[in-house]
Every structure is written in C-alpha cells, then in structure tokens.
Amino acid sequence: MTSSPDGALIATSQLGHAYGDIVALHHLDFTVPAGRIGLVGANGAGKSTLIKVLLGILTPTEGTARVLGIGVADDPIAVRARVGYMPEESCLPLAQTAADFTVYAAELAGIPTKAARQRASDVLTLVGLHEERFRYLGEFSTGMKQRAMLAQAIVHDPDLVFLDEPTAGLDPEGRAEMLSLIGRLGDFGINVLVSSHVLTDIESTCDWVVMLDGGRVLRTGPLTGITGSDTVDVELLGNGAEVIAALQKRGAEVEVRGAVLRVRSSEDAFDLIRDALAESGAGMKRLSQSETSLEDIFLAAGGAE
Amino acid sequence: MTSDQGVVFDLGYQPHDGPRLGRRGAIFATVRDGIRRILGIRRKARKKVMPWVLFGIAIIPVIAVVGVSFFVEDIFTGVDNPFASHGNIFTITSSTFLIFTALAGPELLIPDRVEGVLSVYASRPMRVSDYLGARAIALAIAAGGFLVVPQFILYVGLASLDDDGWFSGLVSNAAELPKVFLAALFYLLAYGAPAFLVAMFAKRLGPAWGVYLAFMWLSSGFAVAITEATSGIWRYAALGALSVNPDIVMDWIFGRTTVREGLSGADLDPIWSVGIILGITAITWIVGLRKYRSLL
C-alpha cells in the first residue's frame, strides 16, 4: 500500500474548519498509517467536512493536512490525482449508463480511453454490476447505485479512497455485501478511509479508527488497541451476590451487566475470580477477556453527548 | 496439454500501471462529455431529438438558398446574390441558435450540480476553472458547429457556382471565412454566456430554458420600447437588447447596414454592443468561479 515516506497516510496538525460562525472542525491533530481507516462519529460530528477538507474541496480555516505525504493546501491537484471519493449523497448522472459513466470517471482521472474502458469493465464486474452495466443509472436501485458509486471511486486505481457513509440506505444484505467489498479494497492495495456513524461497520472492516465528536478527535488508534480491554467478563450460574462480595473484598471493581459481571482489578482479574468462585462455591458458565465495542469506547469517551 | 474441463483464471484486481494524463486528460474528457451531452450522444433517444431537429432547421434554409441560387444563377449575373450571403445565413439561423443555446447551456451545468456529479470532479485532478472552461469549450465546439456548418455549406455551395470553377470560388471567397468565425464567436458569447449564467443557478432544465429565452427576448422588447419612447442618454437602453447585440456586431463585421426596428434610432456605435457582449461574458466567468468554488 502507498503512503508517505514517513509512513503516514493522513496527517493533520491543528486542522480546523468553520462555516461562518459555526466551527465544524476543532484543532484536529492525528496521524493514521496506511490501511483501512475508520472515521466514526455521530451525524454532524464533522466526518464529511473532514473528508472535503482532505480532498481540497473546503479550505481549512486553520492548521494543515497532508494526504499521502502531500500538503492539501499546497497542491490539491496532486492529492486529487491519487485519491478516489464516494460521497454520501448520490453522485451519478441519471441519464448515463453505468458503463459510460464509469469510463468517464476513469478518464477524468487521466486514464487513457482504451485503458479506461477495460478498467471500467473490470471494476463493474468487481462490484457486481457487470450484467447491469448498459442500463441507465436512473433505473438503478439504491444498492446498485451504491455499487456504481464505489466503482467510480476506484476505477482509476487510486492510492487512497474516501468512502463517506457507504452503507447508507442499504438493506442488511446490501450492507453486508458493501462491507465485504470495502474489506477487499485493502487486499487490492488501495488504502481506505471509511466514514460511518454505524460503529459495527467500522469494526468489521477497519484496522485503525479515528473517532470524531463535535468536530474534535475523541480517540485514534489501531482497532485492536482501542477495543482491547483490561477487564474480564464472568457469566455466573445462579445468584452472584456472594461472588461480588468476595471480589470486592479482594479490591476488584465489579460492574453487573445482567448475568455477566465485568471485573477490573490492578491484580490479575482471572486469579481473583478463581478465588472468589472458590470462596463462594458459585458455578460459572463463561469466563473471558472483555470485548469492548467501539460503541462502548465512543460513549465512554463522551461521544455524542 | 488439453483438458475437457474449463479453467477459470481469476485475475483479481489489476492495478493501472499505464500512463496518467493528469489535468490535460481530465479537461479533454470533460469537453468530450459536454459535446456528447449537448447532442444527446450515448443518451436516451429523447435527449437526441431537440438538438438534431434544431440543427436540421438551421441547415435546411441554407441548402434551399444554395439550391435556389443554382437555379436562378443567371438573374444575379454580374451582381452579388442578396440572399446567398453569410450575413443573411446568420440572420436566418440566429433564432434557432438561440433556442439551441437555451437547451445546451443548462444541459451542460445543471445535471452535474443537481445530481451531485460535481463530487466526482472534486476527486479528480482538475480545478474549478478547468471544469467551467471545459464546459465552455464543449459549448463552443457544439454550438460553434451549429453556426459554422451552415456557413460552410454556403461557402462550398457558392464556390460551386463560381464561373471560374469550384476551387477558384473557394479561394475568391476565402476572405469571408475569418469574418464568419468572428461573427460566430460573438453569437456564441452573446447567447452562450447568459445561458451559462442562468444554468449556474437553476435547479431544473425546463425552467432554465424558459427563464433564459424569456430573459433574452423580453430584454430586447424592453430595450426597443425604451429606445422608441425616449431620447438622449436613454438611447443606450438599446444595448439591453441582448438577443440583438450579436446581430448588430455581425452586421458590422460584414459591413452590412441593416435597419433594426426600434433600435436603429439609438444610432450607437457597434463597439458598444461588443463591449456589452464581452462584459456579460466576463461577469459570467467571475460568477461561475465564485459559485463553483465551494462545490468543486
């Protein structure tokens, strides 16, 4: 995968943008490596604004941004020559066929016509629109339109593709297929930045996360690092009151989540649970490291308050 | 080695290792798409009807003029044929050209903006000026062809009537060609710039056509009414006849004196009309850059 010489796919420094008096992005400072990046946040968090700033459509009111090692403000054309973009809203000319538009999208990126035709055919096959390629885009269903939008975003073989809410409006089956396609982009050597307010979409496709809320970065880091946890979940058989008391006596913090106890301790939580179970004589159904969802982290970090 | 079993080669995703043409390629593609869009090429049949019908309407009178000139050649022996002149052909085709421009300008800009296609341009190596310039070039090529092709038919037709032979006719009339191109340029600017201006703000094609045509025709009606009813400084109101200004410039280019009802009394130098046409074109360009700066 292509990234800048320092390994950063995207790097921002004190990046800000305001629409008049409304500040959409506040002093964003983050760096993400090559790979599949998730940009998560509630509606209005600033995800689309950030993507537009990174594309050079919007000019930062403060700070700087570098994409693939190129300063967006310094040379937006150079950035655009190496990226693709699937916007949240439709971007399809309804009076054109999928094949014609995808060829045109490739030519707009400077791909010669003959190669553009070949690539359009290949990419439409990849996204599952080969049979429908000569139909007018105005006749497409929502799911087909989303696929066509993805096709135009990758037809010119970009180094990085921005996908803004790519699963919006899709039914569960369409969503799963779209996520599968997005997951494959990384295998093709295309870096991906996926924006979504559906956190499970990010969990299933990305390996790095940037969390935005109110135009600020809440957290950023590798998905495994963020969702990894220092707590242990134990699911008990029967009443857990005695177990809880035994754990608390040993200095552990216990959070009751229905039939599951989430245990946190400065010592080895597994040992403490073993001892507490032995002391109380209670039975256990399941014991595992806690899996923290992005949603938990997002809420814990104060997101979408 | 042969096998009766089919073999599937999954080529997977193929990266593009060939050349990339950058801005130049993007601009060229946008121009070509614009021409196709204006003429309805690779679009549904209903998109093709109007431009080609209008083109036919523009061509048929020229063919008729050339044909009639062929049969009545003897009548005009020794004098210029008053019908078969480039100026007359411009006068005949200008109304059709106005309608053609009313369709073409909005078709170039409105769908891109309303259907969100500008987002695609925003992720390609091109600037706002590249996009607008490419669309303007597309209009210039398609609409310029609309104006020049009938003139070329006349040029070739008249050459075939030349007593000294076809080639001699082409050579002797060649001096008219620069005038034809210059007059066509002013028609293009005079009609194309307001069409773009309307298209930059309209959200639907139909209303854009209506607003443009009403604006062009009513402005001329008002200009005539004001010029006729007033005098002194008010005679400059004649310049508000937007659909007539290129006719005045064309007459000037071809050295013709044509009485234009209501406006001739203004007695303004044609350079004023040139100024109005160029001024509106400049305003359209500036407005376009400002309007599209936040979209592209």
Image (tube, grey):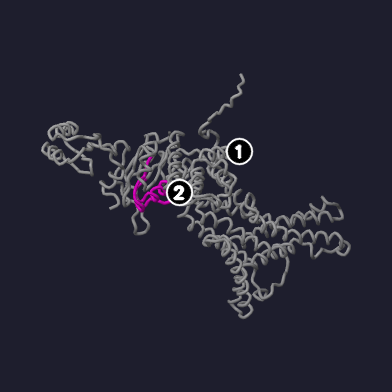
Q: Please indicate whether residue A177 sits to the left or right of residue B102 in the image.
A: left
Q: Residue A64: image x %, image y %? A: 36, 46
In the displayed structure image, the side of residue B200 where residue B68 appears, left or right: right
B181 within the magenta span? no
Q: Is residue A55 shown in magenta? A: yes
User: Which percent across, then down, holds residue A148?
Assistant: 51, 45
Marked residue chain, label 2: A
A57 or A35: nearer the viewer: A35
Occupied quadrant, residue A210 = top left
Q: Is residue A75 visible?
A: no
Q: Which three-letter amino acid code belongs to the residue tagged 2? A: Pro
Most foreground residue, A105 or A291: A291
Q: Secondary structure under badge 2?
A: loop
- Res A114 label: 1
- Mark 2 highlights which residue? A87
Residues shaded magenta: A37-64
Question: Does the rendering let one see residue B252?
Answer: yes
C-alpha span from label 2 to label 1? 27 Å
Say the numbered circle drawn on residue B138.
none
Classify residue B281 by image quadrant: bottom right
Q: Earlier in the sequence, mark 2 or mark 1?
A: 2
Reply above or below: A228 against B6.
Answer: below
- Give coordinates of residue A117: x percent, y percent: 59, 40
| B130 to the left or right of B260 | left
Q: Is residue B228 above or below residue A54?
A: below
